[in-house]
Amino acid sequence: MSSLFRIGQVLKVRIGQYTVTKDIQVTIWFAKNLSLETVVMKSVEGHPRVETGRDVLKRFQYGTPYLRHMIDEIEELDVPVTIALQYIDDNLWAWSAKRTLNRKELKYVSRRILEALSVLYEEGFVRTDIKRHNVLVNFRPVSGSDSDSNPFCDVQLAYLGVVNRQYRYFGPFPPKKTEIATTESLHTIWWLSKEIPREKLTQFAWTTEREVVKKDKDFVGKIMKMDWRNRPTAKETLEDEWWNDEE
């Protein structure tokens, strides 16, 4: 599949322009504005997902600092909907591959993800694809004296495979799930039960306190219930007493 944009191509906006500098993925490019600041260009031909993402960001990005912001929209008639997004240093998946986040850092990141989700949920929007690739982080300068402190200055959910992993650790589905499951969902439940039979489940409930402290284990157990009707909302999760524990 040929790239929609070429390196060096100039894309014009109402005030200014962007020059494409790097091809990242089939639908993602780096570009620089007239001030030589890097932005992320996103576009796809023949599919509405960028247009949908643009509309969601226009509605919500000023309601929370924890959603990646759209900076511009390309205004050229001969290209599909193309948006310029804020450039962020890294994503949580890449960062956590370098070193494991400690409990304090995980809380810092988790709270900001939930703040973003809470804004969406209050308006009836649902964001389900929450994984480390979609959590973006900016790093603050660190001097030798505070090298052990929180490395993040910004955490954002990127603008708009997890069920399999959830089932392995928190399954099986409760029988009452069939009360609300669609035909497609029932097929998925059946497939998961065949793909990961009961004897291969690695129950999170079996973890010891040496692996996960009890207060963390209890908190994770509450938010990862297989029946979504039994899970707390993002707002309720933010109000949980677990956040008050600073240890």
Image: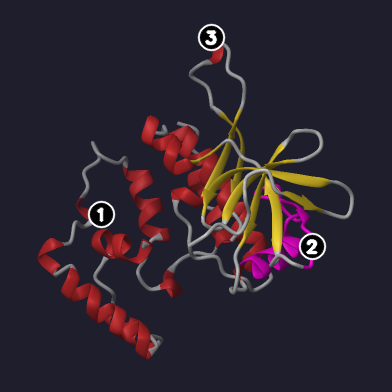
> In the rendering, at what x and y percent does residue 119 appear?
67, 61
- The residue tagged 1 is 204
Residue drawn at (66%, 70%) of the image: 52
Crowd class of label 2 (few under 14; some 14 to 19; many from 20; radius 10 Å): few
Q: Quadrant of the C terminus?
A: top left
Q: 190 or 75: nearer the eye? A: 75
Residue drawn at (53%, 9%) of the image: 144
User: In the rendered image, is residue 101 in sight?
Assistant: yes
Instruction: Examine the image and state in which quarter residue 141 appears.
Output: top right
For residue 144, the mark is 3
Q: 21 or 232: nearer the eye? A: 21
Queried whether the magenta region covers residue 90, the answer comes back as: no
Q: Tell me the magenta residue range.
A: 50-77
Kindly state the secondary structure of the residue where label 1 is placed: helix
Which residue type does callout 2 highlight?
A: Glu
The tag earlier along the polypeptide, 3 or 1, is: 3
> In the rendering, at what x and y percent does residue 216 appear?
38, 45
> In the rendering, at what x and y percent does residue 26 appear?
52, 57
Residue drawn at (37%, 44%) of the image: 215
Q: 155 or 133: nearer the eye? A: 133
Rounded to the nearest angstrom, the CA distance separating label 2 from label 3 is 48 Å
> Residue lying furthest right in this view?
15
Q: Are marks 3 and 1 in contact (CB under 8 Å)?
A: no
Q: Nearer the viewer, mark 1 or mark 2?
A: 2
Which residue type does callout 3 highlight?
A: Gly
Instruction: Examine the image and state in which quarter residue 88 appears.
Output: top right
- The residue tagged 2 is 76
User: In the rendered image, is residue 244 in sight?
Assistant: no
Q: Is residue 203 left or right of residue 163?
A: left
Rounded to the nearest angstrom, the CA distance separating label 1 from label 2 is 51 Å
